[in-house]
Amino acid sequence: MKKILFGLILVWSLPCFSMDAPKLIGDYNDWSAYTFKEGNSVVCYMASTPKKDEGSYTKRGDIYVIVTHRPKDKSFDVVNFVAGYTFKPNSKIVVKIGKESFDSFFTEDDKAWTINDASDKALVKAMFRGERMIVEGTSNRGTKTKDTYSLKGFARAYKAINAKCGKK
């Protein structure tokens, strides 16, 4: 179910291009790696769901994080969080990995991205070193959430998408 969910969610969350259905590269503990064709280009991504999600809410959609490589665009390590709710306008999210804290994100609807490539690369580097990642956000209704992700398998999934998308 998790494999199908990530594939369908990614297809729905990307801009409309001619693309094939995502194909599973492999499952690596708490992370899964995928590839698909977008027009004539190969795209690789890895995804995970939180081990624990906290907040005083009655209903929440799918929650996950994705790291994407688009070699044709020379775009690597793009980190995207999906909260399962619409973020409060101009709200901040905070990501904590070990003693490091990251707060350079922008939000739109139910998604959050880092503000630039350097922030993506720093976040991915921390994800390699960490054991868990905590993501804190605020919904448009003011509900504060805290999602805890395992980083077990992150490095192996990352190596898998690098191999498929030609990143060295």
Image (spheres, grey):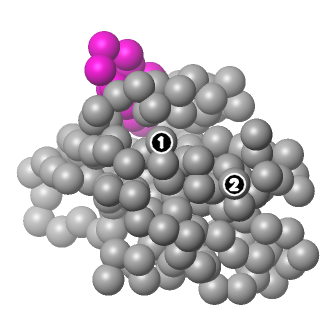
Dot 2 amino acid type = Ala
Q: Which residue is mark 1?
A: 155
Q: Secondary structure at mark 2?
A: helix
Q: Position of residue 96 (x, y in %)?
A: 33, 26
Tell me the quarter of the picture where residue 34 sits.
bottom right
**96 and 23: which one is in front?**
23
Mark 1 nearby-residue class (10 Å; few <14, some 14–19, many ≥20)? some
Magenta-drawn segment: 91-102
Q: Position of residue 114 (x, y in %)?
A: 58, 35
**154 and 85: which one is in front?**
154
- Identified at 53% across, 27% down, the residue is 125
Say whether residue 127 is left or right of residue 55. right
Q: Position of residue 143 (x, y in %)?
A: 20, 46
Q: Secondary structure at mark 1?
A: helix
**112 and 64: which one is in front?**
64
Mark 2 nearby-residue class (10 Å; few <14, some 14–19, many ≥20)? few
**Label ID, residue 163:** 2
- Identified at 88% across, 56% down, the residue is 72
Dot 1 amino acid type = Ala
In the image, is residue 94 part of the stretch drawn in magenta? Answer: yes
Residue 83 vs 113, above or below: the answer is below
